[in-house]
Amino acid sequence: MRDLLTAVPGQRLGLGAYRDDFRERDFAVDGWDSWKLERRQHFREPGDASWDAFDLGDWDEALRLIDAQRPALSDLSRLAARHRCRLLRVRVVELPLTPYLRWELHLLRVRAECGELIRVIRPAHLADQEREGAVPELVTLNDDTVYEIRYGADGTLEGAVRYVDSATRHAVAARIEGLYALGEDVGAFFDREVAGPEPPAGA
């Protein structure tokens, strides 16, 4: 996947600059799907109320706060639809699940129920692309933008490298779409591998 990010130089953005840039570009051009690829099995999301509850070991509150996001997530899907944009995500999942990923899959199930299109793939689907290391975390926006999302060693978001080039965007989107075609609906995966009474051990 990283081989697709060599056509043009990327611009490194710190956390604040990345968030501002994303907001400015999001839905700036109608008619283009947004693709996301998530590979890491652990992240830290301080400031997200549900993740904070999970991190403190309050599983019931973490799930309640995920469910409380439904109106905002549904609004986002409706906004995307007005811009003729689908929100599509490929989530790479290793078994056994990390505690973080067990929490995130609850969130992804709700996101899917609110309109996001999400499929799960296994690391084997990436074997030919990971001979020299894990694929990067990627997001496409509009018709010309790719972000390589950057995280610290502990999994905390640090910013991104932005690539602005239509050919790069199309190549990345096509590669993620190919993985999406191999994936399993997140709801079906959740029902088989995640659903149950036991909370995770904590972040």
Image (cartoon, grey):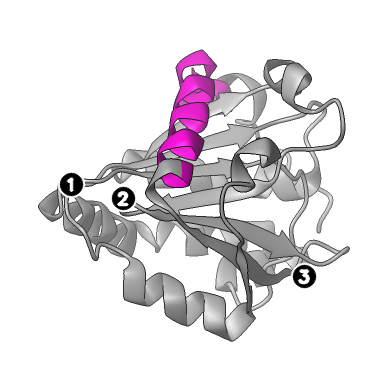
Residue at the limit of the structure toward the bottom, as seen here: 16
Calculate the distance from the C-alpha at mark 1 to the C-alpha at mark 3.
41 Å
Mark 1 is on which residue type?
Gly
Mark 2–mark 1 CB contact (< 8 Å): yes
Work out whether 135 lies above or below 145.
above
Label 2, secondary structure: give it. loop
The residue at the point 40 percent across, 63 percent down is 68
Mark 2 is on which residue type?
Asp
Q: Quadrant of residue 94?
A: top right
The picture places residue 10, in percent across and down from the top left corner, at: 61, 63
Q: Is residue 23 magenta?
A: no
Mark 1–mark 3 CB contact (< 8 Å): no
Q: Which of the two labelled residues, at mark 2 and mark 1, occupies the earlier sequence position? A: 1
Residue at the spot of label 3: 56
Q: Which residues are magenta?
A: 168-190
Mark 3 is on which residue type?
Leu
The residue at the point 31 percent across, 54 percent down is 142
Residue 31 is marked as 1
Tell me the mark number nearer the camera, choosing from 1 and 3: 1
Q: Who is closer to the viewer here, 7 or 89?
A: 7
